[in-house]
């Protein structure tokens, strides 16, 4: 049967209209898909204070200033920015379920006496128990109980040592003197370095490289210092503006461990870093970007 031109036109219009209807339905469905809820809607980058309270342990407090994050309780030192950022991600953790706190038995979720509290500025997170099916953690924020992945609890239940910046020396200071067990190098106001006792291996360039090593040195890990036995020596670094840091040499092999008794922390370095920091071999110029490992 022959189809008229008008029929062909109507058929094409029908196909186009049907396609448009399907497209519109698809787009509407996609736009109406709910975004996953989060514990809060605050921007982690705008948080300026963090407080971690363990029910049976210490309280840890951090503040953000123009130089970045800094611990101010129980010790005052620059903070490990990487681990602080992981902690801040808790603010936007996915909430898989929500319950009004007024309609639940808090004891059932171990929220009647939480073991851990975390505060971001004026927002408090109370951590309860784990639900048995998915292994997710109950967290109370205001008048709502949420379920989140347990990784948020592990990031929040962080040890003090893990929040300490692994850099040996603070930023914004210049070294004026480094007193090692075998030599002391000092820089005068005119920038020239001297060594006591004088050494052929400690040229002006070598002393500058040694100072740079200390300025850039970052420990591979930081741990709580528990004095055990006699120290193997001491390194004293005098900084400008006026400051003095003392490091006890706890071990040289198989790794270098330097401890700061004043803050109760010890810094662990590789054997290669040990050679460069303690002059166990002549300093040499290194190719590349000159950064410590």
Image (cartoon, rainbow, N blue to C red):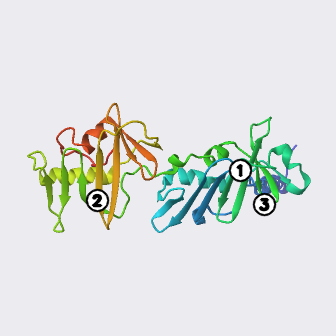
Q: How crowded is mark 1: few (under 14 residues within 10 Å), some or many (20 or more)?
A: some
Name which of mark 2 and mark 1 comes first in the sequence: 1
Q: Name the image quarter holding the C terminus.
A: top left
Name which of mark 3 and mark 2 comes first in the sequence: 3
Q: Name the spot of residue 41 as percent of width and height, x first.
A: 70, 62
Tag 2 secondary structure: strand
Give the residue number, with chain letter if any, for mark 2: 238
Q: Distance between the residues labelled 3 and 2?
A: 48 Å
Is 230 drawn above or below residue 86 in the view shown?
above
Q: Name the spot of residue 131 as percent of width and height, x first.
A: 79, 39
Give the residue number, with chain letter if any, for mark 3: 142
Residue at 54 percent of width and 54 percent of height: 84
Residue at 86 percent of width and 43 percent of height: 108
Please identify, in this view, whether the residue under mark 1 or under mark 3 is nearer the observer. Answer: 3
Q: Is residue 169 visible?
A: yes
Q: Is residue 7 visible?
A: no
């Amino acid at each position: 049967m022959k189809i008229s031109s008008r029929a062909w036109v109507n058929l094409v219009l029908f196909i186009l209209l049907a396609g448009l209807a399907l497209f519109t339905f698809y787009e509407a469905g996609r736009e109406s898909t709910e975004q996953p809820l989060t514990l809060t809607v605050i921007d982690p980058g705008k948080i300026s204070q963090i407080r971690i309270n363990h029910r049976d342990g210490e309280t840890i407090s951090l503040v953000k200033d123009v130089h970045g994050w800094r611990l101010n309780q129980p010790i005052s030192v620059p903070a490990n920015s990487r681990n602080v950022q992981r902690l801040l991600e808790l603010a936007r953790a996915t909430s898989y379920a929500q319950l009004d706190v007024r309609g639940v038995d808090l004891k059932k979720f171990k929220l009647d006496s939480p073991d851990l509290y975390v505060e971001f500025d004026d927002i408090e997170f109370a951590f309860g128990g784990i639900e048995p099916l998915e292994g997710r953690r109950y967290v109370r924020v205001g008048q709502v109980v949420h379920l989140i992945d347990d990784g948020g609890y592990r990031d929040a239940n962080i040890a003090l040592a893990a929040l300490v910046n692994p850099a040996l020396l603070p930023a914004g200071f210049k070294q004026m003197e480094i007193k090692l067990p075998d030599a002391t190098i000092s820089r005068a106001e005119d920038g020239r370095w001297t060594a006591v006792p004088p050494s052929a291996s400690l040229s002006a360039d070598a002393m500058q490289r040694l100072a740079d090593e200390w300025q850039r040195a970052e420990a591979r890990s930081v741990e709580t210092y528990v004095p055990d036995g006699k120290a193997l020596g001491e390194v004293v670094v005098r900084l400008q503006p006026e400051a003095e840091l003392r490091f006890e040499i706890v071990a040289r092999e198989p790794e270098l461990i330097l401890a700061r008794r004043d803050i109760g922390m010890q810094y662990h370095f590789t054997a290669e870093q040990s050679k460069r920091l303690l002059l166990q071999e002549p300093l040499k110029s290194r190719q590349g970007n000159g950064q410590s490992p």
